[in-house]
């Protein structure tokens, strides 16, 4: 897909990745428009950021739906209504059901705060420190029905420090790695340099055997 990309962003929290993506667009580093920001939390700071930037934003309350699948159908309807090329999960803290995932199959992207396939799931920074990892980072990947298991587009890492806590490490992974690699991966997808095909990543016309994994230690 080489045209100007329409991005729908789905977020539950602070929205630091949303901010980095919008900032990159404003700086000319990503040829895209955020056509909607969607959340399961009305008070999510991500929605406040969207409102502040004049972006279309929408909150849907899970309690109004009798189960997770019904919520996901309604969320998918709202997202589909803005006609996105890519649906970007940016700190969306609910597990998505196939009702949502299958509707946007192949154009649903997530960032996970670990060097996948290590540390799928929650508490990644604490688990990496407890295991004595010397490097830790984040991965941008295509979302499939299996949690945190879709093909990785690109990764980035930093070195852990002896006095790191899950909070200090998480803060560095966010500011140094996530906020760089998410806009970078979206630029690669929207320019067509990276393509998701037959369950795998094609980069520069070749099947990607290993995702690029750059070091982001230095300021
Ligand atoms: C990030 O660490 C992201 O990797 C994970 O959730 C966190 C969201 O942070 N999926 P934010 O809402 O983008 O600030």
Image (spheres, rainbow, N blue to C red):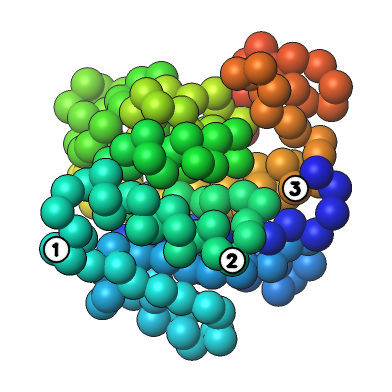
Q: Residue 206, percent across and down?
A: 81, 16
Q: Tell whether label 1 touches label 2 (CB within 8 Å).
A: no
Report how far apart the C-alphas of labels 2 and 1 lie in the structure: 24 Å
Residue closest to the eye, 158 or 31: 31
Beta carbon of the mark 1 residue lies under 8 A of ligand 1: no
Q: Is residue 59 left or right of residue 79?
A: left
Residue 121 % position (x, y)? 26, 32
Q: Quadrant of the C terminus?
A: bottom right
Q: Residues within 10 Å of mark 3 (few under 14, many from 20)?
A: many
Confirm if mark 2 falls within 8 A of ligand 1: no
Label 2 Cα crowd, 10 Å radius (few <14 / some 14-19 / many 20+): some
Distance CA(mark 1)–CA(mark 3) = 35 Å
Give left or right: position of 13 versus 9: left
- Residue 66 percent location from the top left of the image: 14, 54
> Would you name the residue on which mark 2 appears?
82
Label located before the other in sequence (2 or 1):
1
In the image, which is nearer the foreground, mark 3 or mark 2? Answer: 2
Disc assigned to residue 190: 3
Mark 3 or 2 closer to N-term? Answer: 2
Q: CA distance from mark 3 to mark 2?
A: 17 Å
The local secondary structure at tag 1 comes to helix
Q: Which mark is residue 63?
A: 1
Residue 181: which quarter of the image?
top right
Q: Which residue is depicted at the point 60% across and 18% down?
A: 199
CB atoms at circles 1 and 3 under 8 Å apart?
no
């Amino acid at each position: 897909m080489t045209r100007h990309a329409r991005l729908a962003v789905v977020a539950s929290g602070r929205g630091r990745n949303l901010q980095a993506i919008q900032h990159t667009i404003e700086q000319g580093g990503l040829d895209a428009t955020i056509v909607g920001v969607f959340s399961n939390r009305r008070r999510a700071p991500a929605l406040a950021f969207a409102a502040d930037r004049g972006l279309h934003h929408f909150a849907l309350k899970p309690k109004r739906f009798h189960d997770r699948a019904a919520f996901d159908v309604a969320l998918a309807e709202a997202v589909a209504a803005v006609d996105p090329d890519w649906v970007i999960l940016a700190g969306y803290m609910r597990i998505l059901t196939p009702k949502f995932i299958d509707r946007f199959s192949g154009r649903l992207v997530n960032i996970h705060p670990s060097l996948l396939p290590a540390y799928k799931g929650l508490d990644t920074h604490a688990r990496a420190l407890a295991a004595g990892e010397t490097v830790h980072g984040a991965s941008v990947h295509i979302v499939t029905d299996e949690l945190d298991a879709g093909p990785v587009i690109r990764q980035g890492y930093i070195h852990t420090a002896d006095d790191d806590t899950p909070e200090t490490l998480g803060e560095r992974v966010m500011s140094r790695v996530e906020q760089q690699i998410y806009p970078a991966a979206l630029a690669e997808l929207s320019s067509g340099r990276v393509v998701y095909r037959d369950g795998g990543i094609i980069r520069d016309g070749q099947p990607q055997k290993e995702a690029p994994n750059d070091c982001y230690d230095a300021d």
